Amino acid sequence: MCGRTCLTLEPKDLESCCKYNKTGHSKPKQPRYRNEFNCGKKYVPSFNVAPTDVTPVLVSAVHFDDSADSGDRLLVPMMWGMVPRWHKGDFRKHGLTTNNCRLEGLAFSKLYGPPLAAGQRCVILCEGFYEWQTVKPMKPSDRPAFFVHMPQDENIKMEDKSTWQSGNGGQLQLLRIAGLFDVWNDENGDKLYSYTVITFETEGPFSSIHHRSPAILETDAQVSDWLDFKRVPANRALNLLQPCQSLKWYRVSNIVNNSRNKSDQCNKPLAEGKSVDGGSTKGPVVPKSKMMQSWLIVKKRKIDEAEQKPSIDEKVKKEPKPDPEQKLSQEEKVKREQETEPIDKKPKPDPDVP
């Protein structure tokens, strides 16, 4: 499952991070960023990218230039959540959940099958994605959130962009996910490019977090095979998708639960949340940010107050029921006592009295 990502790099920085080697070239090539109108939707770097947001993805250059080599690459902004090509009207109201697609039935899908057959394969780029632990029974709001990323050089900290510069001894390793894209046309002829993330059953340590995970491409060779649809046919490309065994993750605050929270606090690790396989989920975790601490304190206070308020049923049980005897007048009480008095205790009439 993949429902939230983090991508804060500007297009120029993405071009630098996505350099690739190509046969016949002595130096690494850099993909060109190609801007698209996309019905007015623009790419905005964010610490909390949600479906319907626009992010740059890698595609084969031949999709936009017939004379290009299928091994060349472009960076193209596209909307997360594939819009069905047959949809009419507002692209936001097609009524389908298309941010993820299952690998198991991909080739036979009415929605995803045609883009796959047309070679419309893409690579979604992000610094990492957020995942909520769902393998344990708990309320959705109580599920711990984790930030998942690729292994980095020891000098690079995912939560600190100042360490991402290559001068510090390493370069940021982006997380690259296999996906499909399609093109939708509105009534005015404007195009909207949109994509979906391919997922499959989780294997390995990450299965302790979630039972499904995105199809991550770990090596440059895997990225090349996935994008070059003329060299690698669809069936072979799908068979190359395998569970990633090198993922790292750490615990983050649940402020990321709300997609409107876009601050840099979203991917900050909580105390005791370490970037190791099977990130620590035990023990109390305390946010490093004072803002997060105050937010969580207020939230806990509201929950405690709600739990302390007695329910209506409890109030009814606690309130003493009124004694019906208190409402009777003195005369009625005497009359009731006489009626309920045993017959043998009542005075018998004198037989001699006429």
Image (cartoon, rainbow, N blue to C red):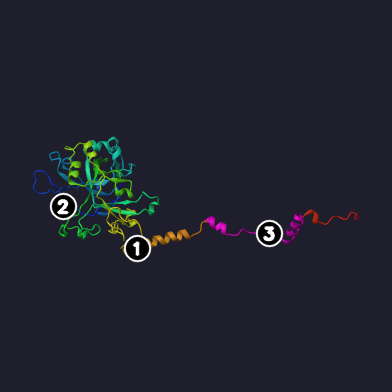
Where is residue 278 drawn, in percent x and y?
A: 30, 53
Instruction: Specify start and end residues of the magenta stretch as a single range.
Output: 312-341
- Earlier sequence position, callout 1 versus callout 3: 1
Q: CA distance from mark 3 to mark 2?
A: 89 Å
Counting residues from the start of the chain, the first of labels 3 and 2 encountered is: 2
- Whole-number angstrom distance, CA of label 1 to CA of label 3: 57 Å
The residue mark sitting in front, 1 or 3, is: 1
Tell me the element at label 3: helix
Q: Amino acid at mark 3?
A: Glu
Give the residue furthest to the bottom. 290
- Percent x, y of residue 245: 25, 48
The residue pinned by badge 1 equals: 293
Q: Is 31 part of what is drawn in magenta?
A: no
| Tag 2 residue | 16
The reply to whether the C-beta atoms of the residues labelled 3 and 2 are less than 8 Å apart is: no
Along the viewing direction, whichever of 1 and 61 lies nearer the viewer: 1
Is residue 209 in sight in this rendering?
A: no
Residue 95 versus residue 248 in the image, above or below: above
How many other residues sit within 10 Å of disc 1, few (<14), some (14-19) or many (≥20)?
A: some
- In terms of image quadrants, where is residue 113? top left
Query: What is the crowding at mark 3: few (fewer than 14 residues within 10 Å), some, or many (at least 20)?
Result: few
**For the residues marked 1 and 2, what is the alpha-carbon distance in whole angstroms?**
36 Å
Residue carrying label 3: 325
Tell me the quadrant of the picture where the C terminus can be found.
bottom right
Disc 1 element:
helix
Query: Label 1 is placed on what type of residue?
Result: Gln
Q: Nearer the viewer, residue 127 or 281?
A: 281
